[in-house]
Amino acid sequence: MDFGTYHHSSRKQSELIRERIRINLKKLKILKELDKPLSNVIDIGFGLGFFSYEISKFLKIKNLVGLDTFDERYIKNLNTSKAISIVDKISAEKITLVKGDASDIPFKDSMFELAISNLTLHNLPKEKRSEAFNEIFRTLKNGGIFIYSDFIFHKNEIIALSGSSASYYNFKVIESINLFTCNGNPCFIISVLQKY
């Protein structure tokens, strides 16, 4: 399936990123432990649905919300058979696409059991990332899981955020897998956080 090219990389690099994500999602323990159907899942930065598509291979999802800024170009692409065929292949009973921003998620508190995000949060300025994390955890149920893959973030930044006054919600890092190393340091990871 053609999920396009990420704005920060070439087509070849985009495919390499997606392949590393596919391989490493299989290693996440949480995807093996979440064996009950999930009523409500949100994909923050839905794009063409790559992360939802991959996650749905492991989980039974009833309702999936794809949240994105959905600019005019995206809306135009939604009308193409390519975009429609990708959304149709995501294994969820119902998919709703919603225009919105990660730092102001238009849903009530404690609505979702799972939030996912791929290559979205690094696009936000650091102060907006704090707001986005607060919004994600506001909309997650207690015990809810947030799985994301992204650049920039590393475990120390997340741990610092979880203990800072910028974070209104308690969460812990359950798992973290390094996908790429830059100058000897993790620079692209998949992390799993849990709200408690």
Image: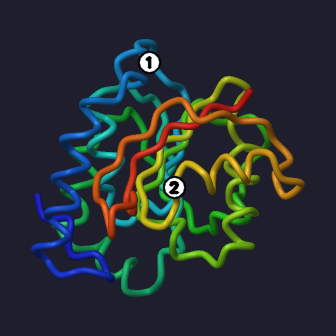
Quarter of the image for residue 62 reads top left
The vertical placement of 22 against 75, above or below, is above
The residue at 32%/82% (across/down) is 8
x, y percent for residue 163: 80, 46
Residue 115 found in image quarter:
top right
Query: Is residue 16 left or right of 64 when viewed as pictured?
Result: left
Q: Which mark is residue 22?
A: none
Q: Nearer the viewer, residue 84 or 17?
A: 17
Q: Pinpoint residue 152: horizontal percent, then vertical percent.
A: 48, 67
Under mark 2, the amino acid is: His
Disc 2 from disc 1: Cα separation: 24 Å
On-image quarter of the N terminus: bottom left
Amino acid beneath label 1: Leu
In the rendered view of the protein, which quadrant contains the C terminus? top right
For mark 1, what is the residue?
A: 34
Q: Residue at x 63, y 57 (%)?
A: 157
Helix, strand or loop at disc 1? loop
